[in-house]
Image: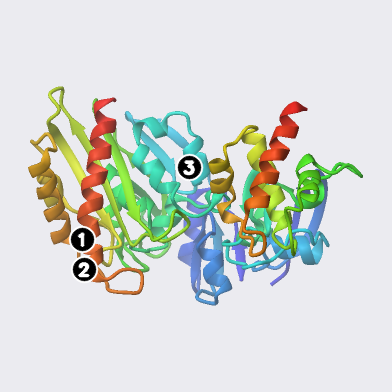
Amino acid sequence: MAKHHIEAKVNGDPVEFLCETEETLLDVLRDTLNLTGSKEGCASGDCGACSVMLDGRLVCSCLVLGCEVAGHSVETIEGMAKGESLHPLQQQFLKSAALQCGICTPGVLVASKALLERSPDPTETEVRYWLAGNLCRCTGYDKIVSAVMDAAATMRKG
Amino acid sequence: MRYEAPESLEGAVALLAGARGDARVLAGGTDLLVQMRADVLEPELIVDIKRIPETRAVKEEKGGWRIGAAVTGAELKEHPRLKQVWPGVIEAANLIGSTQVQGRATMGGNLCNGSPAADSVPALVAAGAVASLVGPRGRRDLPVEDVMLGPRKLALEKGEIVASFLLPPRAARSSDAYLRFIPRTEMDIAVVGAGVSLTVDGAGIVTAARVSLGAVAARVLLVPEAAQAIVGSRLDEPAQQRLEAAARAACRPIDDKRGTTEFRIQVAGVLARRAALIALDRARSN
């Protein structure tokens, strides 16, 4: 069976790639497009390390087939910083040391950005529920949640 | 493995009906991709139905609401009117998985995955939702409670798909609720689920009700005896006790590490009672 020829947008840029039916969007991002920021933790939608935005909606890229994104728009962690300038969430995660091993961090950042775009002044409970699909086995979550709250405050000040 | 994304129901049906090996419908993929990954399924053909307009639309129809089978939980939650009319259906759909899973998971997929513990199914059953099926012999309606026959077993014919659900028109002072028991705060599979939809009159008497239970039998149950137990009452203590007893009497649960038979039966009564009280409270303010 011939590979699928897919045209889509990734981080605002038009991309073309070939993929097999069973390849996930995460496989395509990492292995074909060399965007290795999105991580594979569980490959079953439980851990959130592969979180990306698909047409503005937060999803696990391990639960999307590569061929499903034909004509659609994907945003990954690689699109979060603007050139040399880190996103306020990224800056706050560094400042607060809100990461240890770092595997979950790209997914947490993508998910947190999606939250703050919808809800610029979230409660701690809101942050914790929103990020319930992003598992971290190192931090115990407290530093992550505080960093998201602090970044939200920074972003509200503009 | 072939992948097709037809833009019409007829196209999807023709592909599925003509498949030689195992053919699977892809909606949100939150169950299908996991099962493929775990080698539980290795379909010859995947038919993605998300490019078919009916599966992705939410619209008013005949005083009720038609919801496409591939509308996601996140989209249902964001809909400006649905959560006022059918809060139980919306809360049930939104109990499924994380924010990320909500961005993909659909009620059509939740039903057709064929799990007795599916959260949105008891709520749809209590709501009196009717599935619109399209297959090689045309379109037919089937009440949601009749779509699933048992674990992983559906009443669908070869080539037939669930295109959408119709939620019926709502009388004044009507509402619904869905509750489930899980051993943690979220992101788990129901040990027991209960859905209640009811209507009260101006005097607070229940004039109509539907009660459903999930994860206590081989399929999601509609329990008419539990509904009869509260119709004509003000849902006072004796009526609540009758409701609990009728709900428990309908249970035929499995016994496993997630809940013993005895526990599931006990909890089914408690959840049916609590869901009825929430639905009543919501109905009074409608």
Name the amino acid type tagged 1: Gln
Secondary structure under tag 1 reads: helix
Could you give the CA–CA distance between mark 3 and mark 2, rounded to whole angstroms? Answer: 43 Å
Q: Residue furthest bottom?
A: B39
- Image quadrant where one finds the C terminus of chain A: top right
Is residue A21 depicted above or below B234 in this figure? below
| Badge 3 or badge 2: first in the primary sequence | 3
x and y percentages locating residue B131 in the rendered image: 34, 48
Name the amino acid type tagged 2: Glu
Q: How is the image coloured?
A: rainbow
Return the residue at label 1: B266
Return the residue at label 3: B54
Crowding near pointer 3: few (<14 within 10 Å), some, many (20+)? many
Side of B231 where B104 appears, left or right: right
Crowding near pointer 1: few (<14 within 10 Å), some, many (20+)? some
Q: Kindly check if marks 1 and 3 are in contact, taking CB atoms under 8 A apart as contact.
A: no
x and y percentages locating residue B33 in the rendered image: 56, 65
Mark 1 belongs to chain: B
Q: Which residue is pictured at 49% across the width and 59% down the height?
A: B14
Side of A82 where A99 appears, left or right: left
Q: Which residue is pictured at 52% across the width and 43% down the height?
A: B74
In which image quadrant can residue B175 be found? Answer: top left
- Considering depth in this image, is A148 or B60 the residue closer to the camera? A148
Secondary structure under tag 2 reads: helix
Secondary structure under tag 3 reads: helix
Return the residue at label 2: B262
Q: Which one is in front in this view, the residue at disc 3 or the one at disc 2?
A: 2
Name the amino acid type tagged 3: Glu
